[in-house]
Amino acid sequence: MSQPFPPGFLWGAATSAHQVEGNNTGSDWWAAENRSGSRLGERSGDACDSLHRWPEDLDLVAGLGLTAYRFGIEWARIEPEPGRFSLAMLQHYRQIIAGCLQRSITPIVTLHHFTCPRWFRADGGWTAPHAPATFARYVAAVVPILGGVRWVCTINEPNMVAIMHAATRKASTQQLTASLPDPDQAVTAALIAAHRAARHELADLSEVRSGWTVANLNAQAAEGAAQRADDWRRLHEDQYLAAAAEDDFVGVQAYTRAIIGPAGQQPPAADVRRTLTGWEFYPQALADAVRHTAGLLPRVPILVTENGIATADDSERVEYTRGALTGLLRAIGDGIDVRGYLHWSLLDNYEWGSYRPTFGLVAVDRDTFARTLKPSADWLGGVARANALPAD
């Protein structure tokens, strides 16, 4: 084995509620998927049926030797109508938390992972003046079920939420392989206010560390575009990291890099190796993101809340993850405070319009929902149990 990771380092896998639970009918994403003429190629439908099969999913996490599981609490299920909360769904998520604790798994809870209740979107969404207070009301309803939880992510990838809002406003779908629009600044301000309001609601839980997760885009300058890349990075990423300066931790989420030329973001070169999402195969994205984040927030602990690859070749998943973790270990050796690594994702799940990009450590049969461990799952479980990378 190589140099070990720090004692107590968290090893886990991540999911999000809409992507794995299924039939999230009260959410804005469900409405978008099922709208006539929707640009989304596939509907989430039953997803992975984790709404009912979550005990099996937790057994997989525990059986692999992983010590952490990141999952989402779905706002649309908790508050199906404004100010009306489902006691049954609160108890459902409490049971998942208890299931983690019973299996010695550290639960890492995400309160907002892209989806909102339909009524919230109809009322103006994040552009409504009362949006932060509305989000805080939902968080306050969730607080009583969080006993035993140590890590809470308030909002997942606020920069992508603001970018998606801008893309939707332009009636276009954009991916990382295309040029990302500039994030909507009004939505950005609302998300920062909502994040701070959520942290205020969580403050009475003294054992909880709260923060948000940022999509680290790893902006790199093409020749002659250093200033353009700096400006692009500040707008698309750094303003969201700056908002985490007083947080208990910040979540780093990295997959690839963005090349910025004089005119803005460029597509990957035609001859580069790509993943199923069309992104450049770039394992060093994780270390780059961790180092950049630590440079901006030297006193804020880092939790890698997402990192992975969409591939149909599971050996490629091991290759990518080994490369990412090798770079992460070097960053830790250089003194950066990283508390854990959560692989995206536990399951092959719904990737916001398509089931084709398979990120999972576990395959899911689309008809029977049977879970099948991939070799990459066993590999990562071995790393977790040893708390070190294999020497080879």
Image: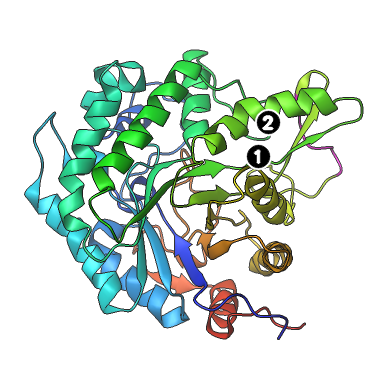
Nearer the observer, 334 or 103: 334
Q: Amino acid at mark 2?
A: Arg
User: Does the image show residue 24?
Assistant: no
Q: Amino acid at mark 1?
A: Leu
The region drawn magenta spans 265-271
Q: From the image, give the main secondary structure of the stretch colored magenta.
A: loop
Nearer the observer, 15 or 330: 330
Q: Is residue 287 left or right of residue 193?
A: right
Q: Is residue 266 magenta?
A: yes
How many C-alpha atoms fall within 10 Å of the one at disc 1: few (<14), some, or many (≥20)? many
Q: Is residue 268 left or right of residue 43?
A: right
Compared to residue 88, the image places residue 119 above or below, namely: above
User: Does the image show residue 290?
Assistant: yes
Q: CA distance from mark 2 to mark 1?
A: 8 Å
Which image quadrant: the N terminus?
Answer: bottom right
Q: Residue at x 49, y 76 (%)?
A: 8
How many C-alpha atoms fall within 10 Å of the one at disc 2: few (<14), some, or many (≥20)? some
Nearer the observer, 294 or 63: 294
Please provide percent x and percent y for residue 384: 54, 78
Please provide percent x and percent y for residue 257: 72, 42
Q: Which mark, residue 336?
A: none
Where residue 24 sits, quadrant-wise, is: top left
Compared to residue 263, the image places residue 327 above or below, namely: below
Where residue 75 sits, quadrant-wise, is: top left
Please provide percent x and percent y for residue 42: 44, 38
Compared to residue 174, the image places residue 115 above or below, namely: below
Q: Are marks 2 and 1 in contact (CB under 8 Å)?
A: yes
Q: Residue at x 56, y 49 (%)?
A: 253
Nearer the observer, 67 or 22: 67
Residue named by callout 1: 217
